[in-house]
């Protein structure tokens, strides 16, 4: 790892509470972290990848201690709780009459990530002090430097294994930090401006990269869905009659072949879904809201005319939200594509502070 690059840690809310099926003792015994009951929480925990470093957090609850209780490394990506095994045995086979044994749709069922716990504390000894940062999201990058520094100290992460002279290394690190703080304001400003320009360019590339993942998948999904409702006249009835003439004028007017659908861009595909939402796609795309489709269409329309100056108006949160919406939108269409967008989103979150 580049010594000048800050280590990325993930905040993970354990979801442990008095009225929850989750239990910190189970997390430790069976080496996992989990999320469920809400597709948004599930999608976020599914973004964790092998090698990601996490800090586990137990939220505040009356009568109980709260704070950070564990530091670990992801060993395996999320799987449904019914498929989670530890030492070759399914975890659910060892739990009697547990709520997670109930048969549920995978969009609300519990999803489990295997963790190699490096250091943990009992709930009563949770690590916390005033002004530490958490998140309303169950999984996110820990950005606050003071929180990271506190947790690195409390969980002994700063101890360097196999170092011949730890004191020399510590002195060197302290001096490097002092040198960084001594940089003149003029140089700092120049670096900030350079970083800002890089971010503006990256915003455009990031959004386009995500849309390029969606484009090959969306027409196929639309075609197959519309054919379920009218195999012979789906093209004319649900596409040609629904889209403006300026889009359809160069397209075949009948659905003799399937070639026409693949000539449409992202914007046209989204318009087809919107125009046929209530009769068709609402019933096909579980847990997807029509407002999300409109949001993607707006992003795409903006994207077609973006300039560097216009991109400056889009904050870190705007880009992050756009990627989150793309991921959620694609989840019921193709999980693989949604996972790829989730990786783009996580890389973006890891690379930039809020701008």
Image (cartoon, rainbow, N blue to C red):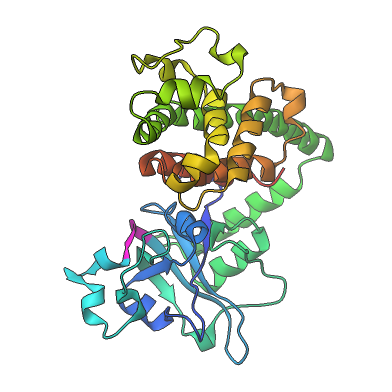
Position in image of residue 224 (x %, y %): 35, 32
For residue 234, what is the image quadrant? Answer: top left
- Residue found at the very far right of the displayed protein: 186
Asked whether residue 76 is drawn in magenta, I would say yes
Number of numbered discs overlaid on the protein picture:
0
Q: Can residue 347 be seen at all in this image of the molecule?
A: no
Q: Main secondary structure of the magenta part?
A: strand
**Relative to the observer, which residue lies in front, 224 or 263?**
224
Q: Which residues are magenta?
A: 74-80
Asked whether residue 224 is drawn in magenta, I would say no
**Relative to the observer, which residue lies in front, 147 or 88?**
88
Left or right of 233: which side holds 281?
right
Which residue sits at x=68%, y=46%?
317
Position in image of residue 99 (x %, y %): 36, 79
Left or right of 100: which side holds 56?
right
Q: Can residue 188 be seen at all in this image of the molecule?
A: yes
Position in image of residue 61 (x %, y %): 60, 84
């Amino acid at each position: 790892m580049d010594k000048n690059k800050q280590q990325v840690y993930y905040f993970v809310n354990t979801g442990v509470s008095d009225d929850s099926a989750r239990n910190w003792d189970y997390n430790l015994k069976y080496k996992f972290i989990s999320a469920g009951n809400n597709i948004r929480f599930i999608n976020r925990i599914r973004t964790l990848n092998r090698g990601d470093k996490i800090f586990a957090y137990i939220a505040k609850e009356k009568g109980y201690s709260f704070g950070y209780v564990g530091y670990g490394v992801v060993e395996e990506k999320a799987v449904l709780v019914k498929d989670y095994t530890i030492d070759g045995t399914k975890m659910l086979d060892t739990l009697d009459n547990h709520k997670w044994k109930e048969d549920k749709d995978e969009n609300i069922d519990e999803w489990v990530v295997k963790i190699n716990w490096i250091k943990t504390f009992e709930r009563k000894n949770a690590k916390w002090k005033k002004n530490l940062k958490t998140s309303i999201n169950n999984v996110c990058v820990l950005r606050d430097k003071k929180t990271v520094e506190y947790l690195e100290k409390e969980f002994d992460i700063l101890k360097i294994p196999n170092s011949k002279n730890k004191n020399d290394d510590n002195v060197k690190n302290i001096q490097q930090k002092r040198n960084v703080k001594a940089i003149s304001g003029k140089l700092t400003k120049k670096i900030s401006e350079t970083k800002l320009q890089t971010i503006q360019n990256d915003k455009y590339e990031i959004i386009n990269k995500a849309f390029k993942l969606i484009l090959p998948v969306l027409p196929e999904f639309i075609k197959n869905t519309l054919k379920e409702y009218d195999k012979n006249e789906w093209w004319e009835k649900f596409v040609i009659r629904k889209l403006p003439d300026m889009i359809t004028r160069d397209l075949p007017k009948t659905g003799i072949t399937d070639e026409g659908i693949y000539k449409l861009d992202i914007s046209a595909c989204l318009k087809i879904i919107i125009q046929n939402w209530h009769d068709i796609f609402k019933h096909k795309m579980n847990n997807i809201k029509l407002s999300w489709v409109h949001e993607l269409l707006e992003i795409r329309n903006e994207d077609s005319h973006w300039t560097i100056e216009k991109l400056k108006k889009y904050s870190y949160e705007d880009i992050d939200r756009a990627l989150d919406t793309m991921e959620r939108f694609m989840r019921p269409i193709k999980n693989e594509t949604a996972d790829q967008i989730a990786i783009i989103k996580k890389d973006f979150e890891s690379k930039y502070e809020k701008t």
